[in-house]
Amino acid sequence: MSKVLVAFFSASGVTASVAAEIAKAENADCFEIKPEKPYTKEDLDYTVKDSRSNVEMADESCRPAMVGGVENIADYDTLFVGFPIWWGREPSIIDTFLEAHDLTGKKIIPFCTSGMSGVEKATAHIKGIVGDKVSVDDGKRLGAEGTKEEVELWTKLLGI
């Protein structure tokens, strides 16, 4: 039986609640990806050209600093990696997390919380970051309502 970790970034709490449902369904550990400098409401205002989130997402090389990391990453075989969708993909803090850990031989299952945008662009971007040393699943978009039943059905179909 593989050991599972649910690593997630949540700007508003929505992704955190879905991550908790996945962790419960998979009997997995959780790790919250936290930026060193927390995002404010103003930072997240995508209607303001110079908001922090817009500036970060416009710079492909941006890697916001995060608090800590997963010290025992070698203990996990499978990582669910969750995030809201920003600019059609994962926030740059997710890239920071992926690059900060040796994920060789692991399976990553991306999941996003989004009302409309899919996870496909994020999954492709994640594959580009981790390369062929990591298996990356197609992932899943879960709406803000990411119900317990929806999560349980999805994780059961994954067969982890």
Image (tube, rainbow, N blue to C red):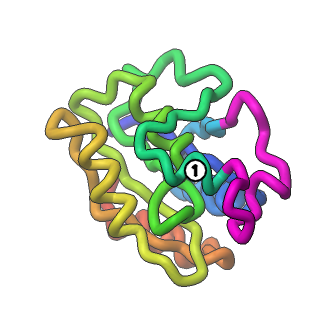
Give whichever of 14, 18 is nearer the camera: 14
Residue 140 is left or right of residue 40, and the answer is: left
Splitting the image into 4 quarters, where does residue 140 fall? bottom left
Residue 125 is left or right of residue 75, and the answer is: left
Which residue occupies 72% across, 71% down? Answer: 47
Say which element carries label 1: helix
User: Is residue 69 depicted above or below 129 in this figure?
Assistant: above
Give whichever of 57, 126 is nearer the camera: 57
Which residue occupies 76% across, 58% down? Answer: 13
Farthest front residue? 49
User: Is residue 154 depicted above or below 51 in this figure?
Assistant: below
> What type is the residue that disc 1 sits on?
Ala
Residue 94 is left or right of residue 48, and the answer is: left
Give whichever of 31, 66 is nearer the camera: 66
Relative image position of residue 57 (x, y in whole percent): 53, 52
Per the rendered image, the range of residues in magenta is 34-52
Mark 1 Cα within 10 Å, few/some/many (few <14, many 20+)?
Answer: many
Residue 107 is left or right of residue 72, and the answer is: left
Splitting the image into 4 quarters, where does residue 101 fall? top left
Which is the main secondary structure of the residues drawn in magenta? Answer: loop
Relative image position of residue 154 (x, y in whole percent): 42, 71
User: Is residue 123 depicted above or below 105 in this figure?
Assistant: below
Relative image position of residue 48 (x, y in whole percent): 74, 64
Splitting the image into 4 quarters, where does residue 2 fall? top left
Relative image position of residue 21 (x, y in whole percent): 63, 60
Pointer 1: what residue? 23
Residue 39 colored magenta?
Answer: yes
Which quadrant does the N terminus fall into? top left
Which residue occupies 59% across, 61% down? Answer: 84
